[in-house]
Image (cartoon, grey):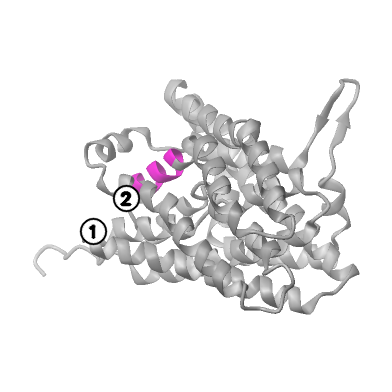
């Protein structure tokens, strides 16, 4: 039953995410309530819904890692190393170009708010959901899993470095805002909300007996899938709730345009790199997806935790999250490996 539910959600993920966005637009109240910390009586603990759901998703991702398949990846690491280099290099190439274009707009701060949101997206590790699209496109799953794991485990180092390197491009106080956010990421967010859950799932996959592991996966996987949708709804409520109370059509249009540009450039650079490396179709698809699919949920949670007074920064993050899934659907269709010839053909 749990497996069927997870499979049903997996095959309809794009449409269900759109429904979550629509639900957030029409009924943002519950999502706004979930964004706040809630005490857990009779203990003195508090539950922060968004970080908890993010941790659940990443724990599930680590739990489902095909550990044996990673051995071959380590013996032939070209695609893995290229993906990690591109994960750091693409933000350094794309964000300055977008900053240059935004300075030509009439925005008083040169679009620094939109740019801050995009920096927080591209500085995040590769999205665990990229493995779903790799599976749909018959891509190189070990390479994708390796990129998700490696970028996630390195994020306490790479995320603060990228934020610090790109913050001079901002103005109007946003540079200070991004620096403060970087300190939060360096001070524990990336470790506790991103790395530790993924590492716990990976460790469980390594040490648990196969029978126990299967039972745990059949319970956790659909819960994580549902949690991902709730997280999407919570993050969307934070942004779209303010849109309803204070409609800003120009901001919405600008958020969509900037997110589309960053998303397009990231995927294009990944595709160009895959061609230059002459990777086979499945590996090329995985590398391209990894370059364009950043963990937008993690960046939205980080914005909510560090910048609760700036919900408008969630708009380009949400737009990027939706656009990257649309682009991923096109990529896995175009780069799907050709079927092997049948015997006697």
Left or right of 263? Residue 136 is left
Mark number, residue 228: none
Q: Where's residue 215, x and y in %?
A: 54, 31
Looking at the picture, tell me which residue is in the foreground, 92 or 159.
92
Overall secondary structure of the magenta stretch?
A: helix
Q: Is residue 85 visible to us here?
A: yes
Q: Quadrant of residue 185?
A: top right
Q: Does residue 148 sit above or below 106 in this rendering? A: above
Magenta extent:
142-150
Give the residue at x 54% y 27%: 200
Left or right of 344? Residue 192 is right
Q: Where's residue 311, x and y in %?
A: 79, 57
Distance (Cα) linking label 1 and label 2: 9 Å
Q: Are marks 1 and 2 in contact (CB under 8 Å)?
A: yes
Left or right of 211? Residue 229 is right
Among numbered discs 1 and 2, the one appearing first in the sequence: 2
Q: Is residue 147 magenta?
A: yes
Give the residue at x 71% y 48%: 176
Left or right of 268? Residue 322 is right
Q: Is residue 228 magenta?
A: no
Q: Which residue is mark 1?
A: 277
Q: Quarter of the image containing the N terminus?
A: top right
Secondary structure under tag 2 reads helix
Q: Which residue is mark 2?
A: 82
């Amino acid at each position: 039953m749990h497996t069927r539910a997870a499979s049903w959600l997996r095959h309809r993920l794009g449409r269900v995410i759109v429904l979550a966005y629509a639900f957030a637009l029409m009924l943002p109240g519950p999502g706004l309530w979930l964004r706040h910390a809630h005490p857990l009586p009779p203990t003195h603990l508090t539950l922060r819904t968004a970080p908890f759901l993010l941790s659940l998703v990443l724990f599930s991702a680590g739990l489902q890692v095909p550990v044996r398949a990673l051995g071959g990846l380590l013996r032939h690491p070209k695609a893995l190393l290229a993906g990690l280099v591109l994960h750091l290099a693409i933000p350094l190439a794309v964000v300055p170009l977008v900053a240059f274009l935004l300075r030509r707009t009439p925005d008083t701060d040169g679009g620094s708010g939109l740019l801050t949101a995009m920096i927080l997206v591209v500085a995040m590790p590769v999205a665990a959901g990229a493995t779903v699209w790799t599976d749909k496109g018959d891509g190189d799953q070990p390479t994708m899993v390796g990129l998700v794991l490696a970028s996630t485990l390195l994020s306490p180092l790479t995320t603060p470095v990228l934020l610090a390197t790109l913050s001079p491009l901002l103005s109007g106080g946003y540079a200070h805002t991004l620096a403060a956010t970087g300190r939060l990421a360096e001070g524990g967010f990336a470790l506790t909300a991103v790395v530790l859950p993924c590492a716990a799932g990976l460790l469980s996959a390594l040490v648990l007996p196969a029978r126990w592991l299967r039972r745990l996966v059949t319970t956790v996987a659909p819960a994580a899938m549902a949690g991902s949708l709730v997280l999407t709804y919570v993050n969307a409520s934070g942004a779209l709730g303010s849109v309803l109370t204070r409609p800003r059509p120009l901001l919405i249009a600008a958020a969509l345009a900037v997110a589309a540009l960053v998303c397009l450039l990231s995927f294009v650079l990944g595709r160009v790199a895959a061609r230059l490396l002459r990777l086979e179709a499945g590996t090329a698809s995985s590398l391209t997806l990894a370059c364009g699919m950043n963990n937008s949920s993690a960046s939205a949670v980080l914005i909510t935790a560090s910048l609760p007074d700036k919900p408008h920064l969630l708009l380009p993050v949400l737009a990027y999250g939706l656009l990257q899934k649309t682009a991923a659907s096109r990529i896995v269709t175009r780069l799907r490996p050709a079927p092997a010839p049948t015997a006697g053909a």
